[in-house]
Amino acid sequence: MIDLRSDTVTRPTPEMRQAMAQAEVGDDVFGEDPTVRALEEETAELLGKEAALYVPSGHMSNQLAVLASVHSGDEVWAHERAHVLSNEQGATSVLARALPRTFTDPEGHPGQDLLERWATGVDDVHRARPRLICLENTFTGLVVPLAEQRRVADFAHTRDMRLHLDGARLWNAAVALGATPAEVAAGADTVSVCFSKGLGAPVGSAMAGDAETVRAARRARKLLGGGMRQAGIIAAGALYALRTNIGRMAEDHARAERLAAALTRIPGLDALARTNMVLVSTPEGAAARYARAFTEYGVGCVPIGTELVRLVVHLEIDDAGVDEAAKRMEEAAGSLG
Ligand SMILES: *Cc1c(COP(=O)(O)O)cnc(C)c1O
């Protein structure tokens, strides 16, 4: 199986395992794990924030950012397909008891008109208080231009709102833009980054922000049962990934282009590369059927909606893997007639 379902399917390399085996550890609930501390400090530094917190998942880091930013009943604005609202079991409503408000702009960032409209009448006694805007970069592989991000951040800050950046694939955005991670994170009050997706670590994400917000998130992490003991073992994998694997993501992006170019030649299909993802357009309503056929022919993928099939290139896929995947997918498409 050439597994292109996600960039989370990678397994730690021997070098990463060695770094994990040799990690210095301590009890991180007491703040005594030197490897976790090193990971948190390097992550904060890289993102240009005061502090960072290591957490088991991106889901948790997103929700900690929400918990640290809003009061019960406040509005959280995000894209209708944003992970924080659509893929975390409604946690913003369950945990922070926030009121989600969703925009639908295909580029992933809300237009200025909509922002202005949603921000009018906030003093009306009937109205929930808008408090947090969430953006994703990348947004399903799509790079959100930094100027748009800055516009939304500036808007938030003039309205006493905060910006959370879900940067599960922020590293991909930075590499694609030729920007530093700190430049991508600039303007966001809180940022979530992932050490698994694309970077190849076995476990974990981090939430970064100012020291006070990260202190609040550290308390909330304990509330949710996310305090970990000798977490340096897994943090060492994340630290190794952070130090080693950001630069090589350019290869993933090039391979996504290569795969998309090959798939576009298959009759009936179109394909588009976005950073490390390839989105294959199938005839309307046929996404699930194509995804099943691709899988049967040995290419792991996931249907998105009724028309798209998603493939994600990652560090276990080389050029030969891309070419083989394209060949199998062509056969699979042919089998559907
Ligand atoms: C994967 C992902 C998450 C959640 O990360 P987990 O570690 O799987 O909980 C959050 N946001 C985005 C944009 C993601 O792609």
Image (cartoon, rainbow, N blue to C red):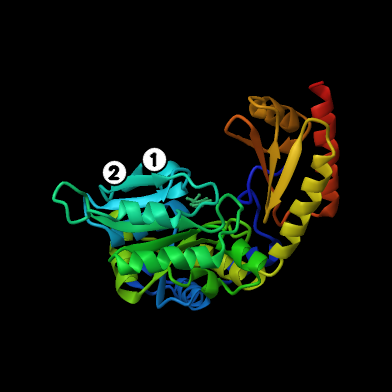
Q: Tag 2: residue type? A: Val
As drawn, 32 above or below 133: below
Give the image location of residue 104, x and y in percent. Answer: 47, 44
From the image, tell me which residue sits under label 2. Answer: 94
Image check: 79 left or right of 226?
right
Mark 1 and mark 2 residues within 8 Å of each other at the beta carbon: yes
Pick out the residue farthest to the top: 337
Q: Residue at x 85, y 46 (%)?
A: 323
The x, y position of residue 208, in whole percent, is 42, 69
- Which residue in the protein does label 1 denote? 89
Circle 1 crowding by C-alpha within 10 Å: few under 14, some 14–19, many from 20: few
Residue at horizontal 60 percent and vertical 50 percent from the top: 8
Q: Say what secondary structure mark 1 lies in.
A: loop
Q: Nearer the viewer, residue 108 or 223?
A: 108
| N-term-proximal mark, 1 vs 2 | 1
In the displayed structure, 73 sits above or below 44; it is: above
Give me the residue at 72% from left, 58% from top: 253
Q: Position of residue 176 (x, y in %)?
A: 66, 64
Residue at 34% in and 75% down: 211
Q: Is residue 103 in view? A: yes
In the image, residue 174 lies at what x, y percent?
61, 67
Is residue 297 left or right of 136 when viewed as pictured?
right
The answer as to whether callout 2 falls within 8 Å of ligand 1 is no
Q: Give the Cα distance between marks 1 and 2.
A: 8 Å
Q: Amino acid at mark 1?
A: Gln
